Amino acid sequence: MIAPAESGRKCNANPYVFIVHSSIDIMSLAEETLELIKTGDRLFDEGSFEQALQYYEKAQELFPRDDGILIKKGIALGSLNRIEKAIECFNKVIELYPSETVAWNCKGIMLNELGKCEEAIQCFDEVLRIEPDYFSAWFYKGVSFDNLGQPKKAIECYDIAIKNEPDLAYAWYCKGLALKKLKLEEASLEALARAKELGME
């Protein structure tokens, strides 16, 4: 979850708040593999990340080059705080499929987790080169700038994310925190209020 406003400078977002289950071409996978993936997804949604990872790894053994499975495995590893291992998965996807925006985005999120925000921005820029309206990349690019102490640039990114996804509570929340850093109290309160309306506590 994002850190409360009073807890510090950073806008720390849940790394997977925007990462939906990756689409997989069901026609290309055997029924056994699909069942492994479905079970892994169910366990992941229940918060059983270690068990989910085991099912994704079994699926990967059957289809080692499938980008969807590798991404799911990377996300599970990231959820277990095995950040370097997660990045290895995303790098493998990028090596196989250089235009896979989900992998670039996930890699950027993980680099943010490691505090490598400049490298993370490069990943998000690659996503946006391929998909200019990818709101998750705009949001996390904003988080990178926020963590680098550049709230003005962060707000620019949050605004674009909000333009593409107006009900993005996390973006409104982080925008509110960034505005507060710039001592724009009224605008900050408005953004935070909007985040609360959208379900942020």
Image (spheres, rainbow, N blue to C red):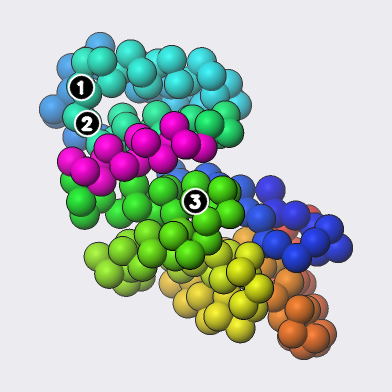
Q: Earlier in the sequence, mark 3 or mark 2?
A: 2
Q: Secondary structure at mark 3?
A: helix
- Percent of width and height locating residue 189: 80, 78
Task: Judge whether residue 91 is colored magenta.
Answer: yes
Find residue 66 and name its label.
2
> Considering only vertical position in the picture, is 74 above or below 153?
above
Distance between mark 1 and mark 2 Cα atoms = 6 Å
> Mark 3 against mark 1, which lies toward the viewer?
3
Residue at 34 percent across and 52 percent down: it is 104
Could you tell me which secondary element the residue under label 2 belongs to? loop
Percent position (x, y) of residue 125?
36, 68
Is label 1 in a helix, a strand or a loop? loop
Disc number at residue 10?
Answer: none
What amino acid is found at the position of numbered circle 1 in the picture? Answer: Phe
Q: Identify the residue position indicated by label 3 in the image.
A: 111
Q: Amino acid at mark 2?
A: Asp
Q: Which residues are magenta?
A: 83-96
Image disc number at residue 63: 1
Q: Is residue 113 left or right of residue 84?
A: right
Can residue 155 be seen by looking at this rendering? no
Assign the C terminus to one quadrant of the image. Answer: bottom right
Identify the residue shown where x is 61% and y is 83%: 152
Q: Residues within 10 Å of mark 3 (few under 14, many from 20)?
A: many
**Image location of residue 134, percent across then percent down:** 37, 64
What kind of residue is marked 3? Answer: Leu
Contact between marks 1 and 2 (CB within 8 A): the answer is yes
